[in-house]
Image (cartoon, rainbow, N blue to C red):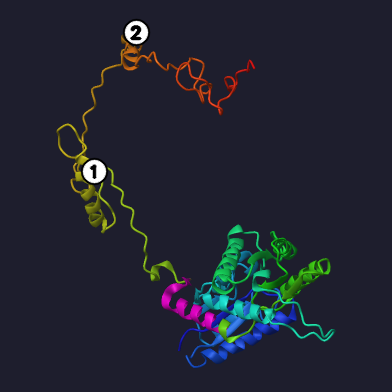
Amino acid sequence: MKPPLLLIGHGTHDETGVAEFGRFVHRLRCRLDGLPAEVSGGFITNARPPLGDSISSLVARGHHHLIAVPLSLTGDRRALGDIPGTMALEQERHPTLEYDLGRPLGPDPRVLKLLAERLADARAEMPRFVTDEPPAEIAPGETAVVLVGHGSTDPAVNAEVHRVSRLFWETHAADLLTVETAYVSHTRPGVPGGLERCRRLGAKRVIVLPYVLFAGGVLERIWAQALAYGANHEGLDIRCAEVIGDCEGLADVVIDRYEEALAGGGQSSAPAARRPSTVLPVTRPFPAGRTPVDPGAERDAGLVTAIAPRLSGARETGGAPLTPSLVDPAPLDPAPLDLEPLDVDAFEAEAFDEAFDETFDAETPEPEADGEIEADSMIGAVGRGEAGEELRGDAPDGPLAQPGIASAV
């Protein structure tokens, strides 16, 4: 039997979101019943069932290895909660508990496809019962989309939503005017700001597309902000799409995250001794006359010996090559260097100045007589030709003022 799947929700005070979360857990139970694998779920805060109760129930049924998948479209730990910290507390309560943490759900191509389905439903012409006049035709090039995310204080998380907007525009909405990004809270632009940008770009219809999994308080805030903006802009057709919600497409993404973590692609909580280490050992030479305590130090000494010939090639003088103490335990007795004291009086200031002047005069060529540049500045000579020629039209009337020097003009 495979390890159970534990769905982690961020929690909400809205009963609609809690009920939809429960329906989604039931859908996954029906899907994974044939594997076979148990499915459970819980919230970190603000809703029931708590995550701790779900874990305790799985451990009581004999499960000590879980696959935890956060139901989140971004990797925002501040919004979803401290999952590693919460799971660490559960491991203190259940010492035999181990888990693998799967990746967030977005941006997955199937998530973008689900967004395209919600957009198509919102773009469909709705029947009008007030008047018999046909609705005005609005071309796709006059239709814009505002993709709305939760918003975070982490700029990297907000950048993920911008990336999703660009991917969605190029893969599923290339015929539309634009796909703008907005956020519900914590950062700018808000929903009204995204709608205003679309209006200024010339959109006659704007569809607000929530980048949200389940219905609840967040969806209500998005719709409220959109309706408040539409009340002051009656000429703009504003429509609000539904959330991704409980569906088979979302279940497919979660099952893939489960299989990926089960195959070792997730973040494991197993102790370091049980996992193969990919960190290369750091080799340091021991002081002269000492032997390593580690039995495998002789193997590490071969690494040092392999580098020694490269260092010996840089020696210009003869002598015995440098040998690590691990290969030759005899301590080295380097001879002191015989350095002559520096005679400061040997450098006479006047003799040094005369030698420098002679060298500078010998290397600097004399300017030619024809076309000699005046000694004012190269800046003042912009646009000048040879000697005796008139100034070009783009040349200044006089020498340009230099920084820090008062101009005489």
User: Is the magenta region chiefly helix, strand or loop?
Assistant: helix
- Whether residue 266 appears in magenta in the rendering, the answer is yes
Instruction: Determine whether the residue tagged by mark 2 lies in a helix, strand or loop.
Output: helix
Amino acid at pointer 1: Gly
Between 383 and 294, which is closer to the camera in this rendering? 383
Can you give x and y, in whole percent of width and height, for residue 293 in the image?
Answer: 28, 54
Quarter the C terminus occupies: top right
Can you give x and y, in whole percent of width and height, for residue 155 in the image?
Answer: 61, 58
Q: Residue at x 50, y 88 (%)?
A: 37
- Asked if residue 186 is positioned above or below residue 44 in the image, the reply reads above
Amino acid at pointer 2: Glu
User: Looking at the image, is mark 1 or mark 2 earlier in the sequence?
Assistant: 1
- Asked if residue 67 is positioned above or below residue 280 in the image, the reply reads below
Can you give x and y, in whole percent of width and height, for residue 269 in the image?
Answer: 48, 71
Residue located beneath label 1 in the image: 289
Q: Residue at x 36, y 68 (%)?
A: 276
Between 84 and 205, which is closer to the camera in this rendering? 205
Quarter the N terminus occupies: bottom left
Q: Residue at x 56, y 80 (%)?
A: 6
Do tag 1 and tag 2 residues touch (Cβ < 8 Å)?
no
Q: Quadrant of residue 105?
A: bottom right
Instruction: Determine whether the residue tagged by mark 1 lies in a helix, strand or loop.
Output: loop
Residue located beneath label 2 in the image: 354
Q: Residue furthest top?
A: 350
- Number of numbered discs present? 2
Between 168 and 370, which is closer to the camera in this rendering? 370
Q: Which mark is residue 197?
A: none
What are the residue bounds of the magenta stretch? 251-268
